[in-house]
Image (tube, rainbow, N blue to C red):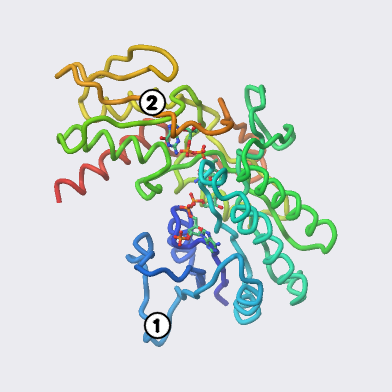
Amino acid sequence: MKKTALITGITGQDGSYLAELLLKKNYIVHGIKRRSSQFNTSRIDHIYQDPSLHKRNLILHHGDLLDSPNLFNIIRNIKPDEIYNLAAQSHVAVSFEQPEYTANADALGTIRLLEAIKNLKLQSKTKFYQASTSEIYGDNNLKKLNENSNFKPSSPYGVSKLFSYWITRNYRDSYNIFASNGILFNHESPRRGETFVTQKIVKGLVKIKYNLQGCLFLGNLDAKRDWGHAKDYVFAMWKILQHKKPDDFCIATGKSFTIKNFIDEVAKNLQMKLKWEGKGVNEVAINTRNNKKIIAVNQMYLRPSDINSLTGDYSKAKKLLNWKPKINFSQLVKEMVDSELDKYSK
Ligand code: NAP
Ligand code: F7E
């Protein structure tokens, strides 16, 4: 008997890689996508199956985390073995502009799904994965963060996700639902959204290389992040739900780099030489080939509060799930740059 999974956020970076993984594992995959005025399925078009096909193993449903009856009906009709709740307003800076919407989707959305499992009495059938995040730690002076570190989120996004972290644990303890949190540190890929800093840097520097853009404006250049590859991380999500009991796991690489380090690595892959000058908001990078300023800070990209440094400790996942990241920082950057260059050569 094939397993059935429901992925919220299937059109996002992680949803697309997870759908690929589960299809390879012979699951029937259901995904929730939002109605939009233009197609929003570019990340999953390569696995799309026409609804007129007699037998399909990828089925899309219109839906929204803000819409309880819609979520309830989808879950009642499918009765999935596994639900992966990946849908979210996932941009930290945007969460300061839309705090109420972010809380509605990222905090209450999780309750809506857990309530459906509870009220449909699916406790003994349906396992639940919650996409938690290193943003729940906030600025924590610890060198490496693990499942026992303190939580002190510093954005409406982080606060909403911390609510979801606790409600997932609460429904696990109160109603015996197999509900687990994956506390994932930043993960990227060629499918990363264009407004996250890694993809913004890759796309910006490639354009600069081809003289299609002058200067790239960024915010906090000194922030440090632990960047892994989304493909490795969706494998961890699946492993978390295959574990013998529900639990919470940090998924990270254990190494962190500054935004400037990321820029230097991208530049290296593009055979560009940069020279850094100035400090703080006046810091700039100069292209040594033509002496042009190509990176500068624009204060509009600074957040009301930011997290200076995040590094994760994945030893629990390594020990209990036998999971470890396969793709390192330089391989990740190379893949993102090569994929962008490939689009231009095409
Ligand atoms: P993403 O690319 O931004 O994808 C988010 C997905 O959620 C998209 O499919 C989006 O649909 C959907 N969505 C947004 N609001 C929704 C709503 N109200 N109802 C239904 N669907 C909605 O994010 P990602 O990088 O794949 O991340 C996946 C999950 O992991 C998110 O929950 C994120 O917060 C969390 N997370 C991400 C990272 C990371 O570094 N990537 C780290 C830790 C945790 P549209 O395509 O229509 O916009
Ligand atoms: O910012 C700094 C920014 O937006 C990283 C989400 O997937 O990971 C992601 O959240 C750092 C921050 O990711 C720009 O201030 C500088 O310090 O790429 P980001 P994020 O905020 O870490 C976590 C784990 C999630 O859960 C989230 O869903 O880079 N930064 N200049 C900038 N960031 C952006 N976006 N744009 C800039 O111009």
Q: Which residue is mark 1?
A: 51
Identify which residue, 223 or 318, lies in the foreground.
223
Q: Which residue is mark 2?
A: 297
| x 61%, y 65%: residue | 83
Query: Reading the chain from its start, which is encountered first: label 1 or label 2?
Result: 1
Mark 2 crowd level (few <14, some 14–19, many ≥20, 10 Å Cα): some
The disc labelled 2 sits on which kind of residue? Val
| x 65%, y 30%: residue | 145
User: Which is closer to the viewer, label 1 or label 2?
Assistant: 2
Residue 217 rendering spot, x and y as whole percentages: 34, 31
Q: Secondary structure at mark 1?
A: loop
Mark 1 crowd level (few <14, some 14–19, many ≥20, 10 Å Cα): few
Identify which residue, 297 or 325, lies in the foreground.
297
Residue 173 lies in quadrant: bottom right
Residue 47 rendering spot, x and y as whole percentages: 36, 67
For residue 1, above or below residue 127: below
Q: Secondary structure at mark 2?
A: strand
Residue 302 rendering spot, x and y as whole percentages: 48, 31
For residue 120, above or below residue 281: below
Task: Give the alpha-carbon distance from disc 1 to disc 2, as whole Å.
Answer: 48 Å
The disc labelled 1 sits on which kind of residue? Pro
Using residue 309 as the reference point, say whether residue 294 is left or right of it. Answer: left
Identify which residue, 245 or 13, lies in the foreground.
13
Marks 1/2 in contact by CB < 8 Å: the verdict is no
Residue found at the far right of this picture: 174
Residue 246 rendering spot, x and y as whole percentages: 73, 54
Using residue 327 as the reference point, say whether residue 184 is left or right of it. Answer: right
For residue 21, above or below residue 333: below
| x 20%, y 46%: residue | 342
Residue 153 lies in quadrant: top right
